[in-house]
Image (cartoon, rainbow, N blue to C red):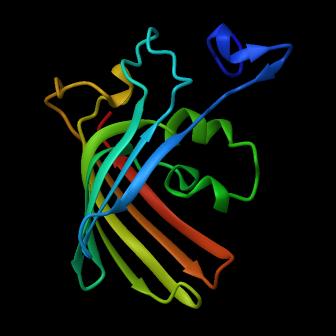
Amino acid sequence: AKYFSLRSEFTENTFTIRRSEIKLSGTITEDVEYEVMLDPSINTSGGNPSILQDAVIVYKVGGGFEAKLGQFKNLQTYEGVTSSSEIMFAERAQLARQFGDKRDRGAALSYGFGDPKEFGGKATLAFFNGLNDSMSGKGNDTNAQKDFVARLDLNYGKTMKFGLYTLQGS
């Protein structure tokens, strides 16, 4: 098996288009944001039914709290919750590819605190359908058991970041 399993139309002469991203994001009101992301290079015949990757609505409740609802990465790795532009290495870790880049439908409640330039953090509780290995998390909820995630991401200054998470479920 190849490191990346891509359809033949996305490879030529060993040059590979591994990923293309079409992203729309914006603000509906001062407290409500949205994001939709498509990846046309996804093979939709191999158990992944759609090129839709993310479809999210974020509501900023106030007091540092925000609620997120939709289809998005299931919060398992630091690389998975961080913008690619902010990751130190160009190549993602295999662990992040296997676990952190999986998507599922769910909801998350986060609380941000402190100062991002000094000491701060973000605590998140979330639940997902538990279908990230079935139809890439993009199908209707057919699973009675849910996945529960708790994360604590901390920073000391802009460069030192640390934290922990747990996943209960599948």
Q: Position of residue 34 (x, y in %)?
A: 32, 56
Measured along the vertical axis of the image, is residue 120 above or below residue 5?
below
* Among the 4 quarters of the image, the one containing residue 108: bottom left
User: What's the residue at 71%, 14% (across, down)?
Assistant: 2
* Among the 4 quarters of the image, the one containing residue 58: bottom left
| Left or right for 86, reference 40 | right
| Left or right for 159, reference 76 | right
User: Residue lying furthest left in this view?
Assistant: 144
Identify the image quadrant of the N terminus.
top right
User: Residue lying furthest right in this view?
Assistant: 13
Whether residue 119 can be seen here: yes
Whether residue 134 can be seen here: no
Q: Position of residue 117 (x, y in %)?
A: 59, 88
Measured along the vertical axis of the image, is residue 2 above or below residue 141?
above
Labels in figure, total: 0
User: What's the residue at 65%, 62% (across, down)?
Assistant: 86
| Left or right for 41, reference 54 | right
Identify the image quadrant of the C terminus.
top left
Q: Position of residue 100 (x, y in %)?
A: 51, 43
User: What's the residue at 40%, 62% (across, down)?
Assistant: 151
* Among the 4 quarters of the image, the one containing residue 5: top right
Measured along the vertical axis of the image, is residue 27 above or below residue 170?
below
User: What's the residue at 52%, 49% (across, down)?
Assistant: 80
User: Toward the viewer: 156 or 41?
Assistant: 41
Q: Position of residue 159 (x, y in %)?
A: 69, 76
User: Toward the viewer: 170 or 26?
Assistant: 26
